[in-house]
Image (spheres, rainbow, N blue to C red):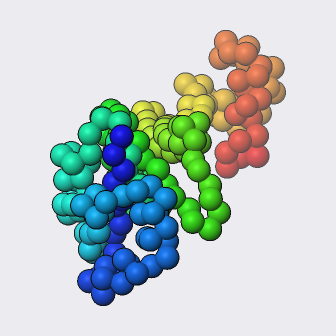
Amino acid sequence: MVFHFYLNCADTEAASNIKQHVTFKEICKEFSIPPDNVVIEIVNEQQPVSHQRLLHELVNHKANKGDTIILTGLSSLGRNVEDILDILFFCFKKDINIYCYHPHTRIEPSSESCMSFLISVQTGVDIQNIKSSRSKHRRIKKPLGRKEGSHHKLSIYTLKLKGYKQSEVARELGVSISTVKRHWSNGIIG
């Protein structure tokens, strides 16, 4: 099992100063990481993850089955959740371990916490997909609710104007009294 340490920095000044940082020295000492297995990449926050050439080289070529990549946080794997998930799933398929080292809290993520993170992210994505598909169907299909109007609406209004009672209108048109009542007080004529 080989340990690799991946860091990303905003500029060359930060990249040159990072080797003097206490956390950097502590990680290299604790995991016995040789200098060739330390990858420091200068990353522009505006560019997509596909431009992180050294990260892809590390994951695709340098790290092998059973190796461990040590990070200071999952945010170094991508700009958004989808990018992070893509790289994590690729590492899991290739059987590369990801270890997030937190020097102040000493939290060591277990496989259960990593999987719960992935499941919660996937659930969030699924909920968004359901919401968007539901709103698409509402726009595409017929509108929600009861259909407007009836075949007898106009006839009910005209018989009401002639002075018929509700029961007489129902008998005359051959419809139920509830249909007549539904249209009796609705509309212009109240």
Total number of numbered labels? 0
Residue 47, compared with residue 106, is above or below; it is below
Image location of residue 44, percent across then percent down:
27, 75
**Residue 85 vs residue 100: left or right?**
left
Instruction: Please tell me which residue lies in front, 129 or 30.
Output: 30
Report the residue at 76% width, 22% height from top.
Answer: 178
Picture coordinates of residue 10, whole percent (x, y): 33, 79
Q: Quadrant of residue 9?
A: bottom left
Query: Residue placed at 79% from the left, 26% from the top?
Result: 166
State the residue at coordinates (40%, 81%): 20
> Does residue 135 appear in the picture of this structure?
no
Residue 33 appearing in the image: yes
- Left or right: 139, with 163 as reference point: left
Q: Residue at x 56, y 62 (%)?
A: 102
Residue 51 is drawn in which quadrant? bottom left
Q: Position of residue 58 (x, y in %)?
A: 24, 52
Residue 115 position in % (x across, y down): 53, 37
Image height of 125 relative to 14, above or below: above
**13, 176: nearer the viewer:** 13
Quadrant where the N terminus sits is top left
Nearest the eye: 163 or 136:
136
Residue 22 lies left or right of residue 6; in this view the side is right
